[in-house]
Image (spheres, rainbow, N blue to C red):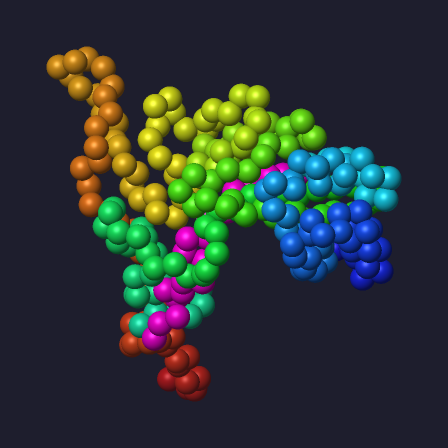
């Protein structure tokens, strides 16, 4: 449920008073506040968010990684496909429509990876969205918050598995969704939709083996509704006596 403007103002005042200069940005959006912190300030700020009686964000409801590699690219803005509905643009703006080795042009400036935390205060019945950008695109790292909210344990492992974001100080940082020996991070925007390896049963070795994928990268393109006679609705027949 969206918070009222009055509650948002009270929460914003409490955040600015308790966190002060640590807040890099504060934005109201969709009835909630979003604050941005630097990675170095994350552990201390999270303890303040949890323990301060004016804030009391006791629960971490969710944590997710974000890859901004293709953010701002629009392959839907075309004249050859419908602008709404079940269609796909024809201008190749996404990496999945390129060859494996290509990287799309950046759609925004700034860091590529971020971690977003969804916090809930049961005491005050308000919510907060917290965002932290990783400073190094090649090796994205943020401090772990498992010591603050134990529920972050598996969430951080999931973000590490799918995005390759390292959570410094995590007690057991290892993959949680992909298979043993999996190579790459499948939620990264430059990870091919067909994967990098394929699995098959080898009758000679009598076991399942993994090998480089043998099919070309492709995207399943949905039906495009075009303005031609095949898509025109037939006019109703004129009523009258036969």
Give the magenta-colored segment's residue range.
61-79
Q: Is residue 228 above or below residue 58?
A: below
Residue 41 percent across, percent down from the top left = 65, 42
Q: Is residue 70 magenta?
A: yes
The C terminus - image quarter: bottom left
At horizontal 57% and vertical 27% (from top left) the residue drawn is: 169
* Residue situated in front as seen by the camera: 131 or 31: 131
Q: Position of residue 191 (x, y in %)?
A: 34, 43
Q: Quadrant of residue 161?
A: top left
- State whether the magenta stretch is mostly helix, strand or loop: loop
Q: Is residue 240 magenta?
A: no
Whether residue 183 can be seen here:
yes
> In the rendered image, is residue 1 in sight?
no
- Residue 218 in the figure: left or right of residue 127: left
Residue 141 on image: x %, y %: 50, 37
Q: Nearer the viewer, residue 5 or 132?
A: 132
- At 19% across and 13% down in the image, what residue appears? 206
- Total marks in image: 0
* Residue nearest the viewer, comparing 218 with 159: 159
At 23% from the left and 21% from the top, the residue drawn is: 209
Q: Residue at x 59, y 32 (%)?
A: 144
Residue 10's x, y, as percent? 84, 55
- Tell which residue pokes out farthest to the left in this image: 204
């Amino acid at each position: 449920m969206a918070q009222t403007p009055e509650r948002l103002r009270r929460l914003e005042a409490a955040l600015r008073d308790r966190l002060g200069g640590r807040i890099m940005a504060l934005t109201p959006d969709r009835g909630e506040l979003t604050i941005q912190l630097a990675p170095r300030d994350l552990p201390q700020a999270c303890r303040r968010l949890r323990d301060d009686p004016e804030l009391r964000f006791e629960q971490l409801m969710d944590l997710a990684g974000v890859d901004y590699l293709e953010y701002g690219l629009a392959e839907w803005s075309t004249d050859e496909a419908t602008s709404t509905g079940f269609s796909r643009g024809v201008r190749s703006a996404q990496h999945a429509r390129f060859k494996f080795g290509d990287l799309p042009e950046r759609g925004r400036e700034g860091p590529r990876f971020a971690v977003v935390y969804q916090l809930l205060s049961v005491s005050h019945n308000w919510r907060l969205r917290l965002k932290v950008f990783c400073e190094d695109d090649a090796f994205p790292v943020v401090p772990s918050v498992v010591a603050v909210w134990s529920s972050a344990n598996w969430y951080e492992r999931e973000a590490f598995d799918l995005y390759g974001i390292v959570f410094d100080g995590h007690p057991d940082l290892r993959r949680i969704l992909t298979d043993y020996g999996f190579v790459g991070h499948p939620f990264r925007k430059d990870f091919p939709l067909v994967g990098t390896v394929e699995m098959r049963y080898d009758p000679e070795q009598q076991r399942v083996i993994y090998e480089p994928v043998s099919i070309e990268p492709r995207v399943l393109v949905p039906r495009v509704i075009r303005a031609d006679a095949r898509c025109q609705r037939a006019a109703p027949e004129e009523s009258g006596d036969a």
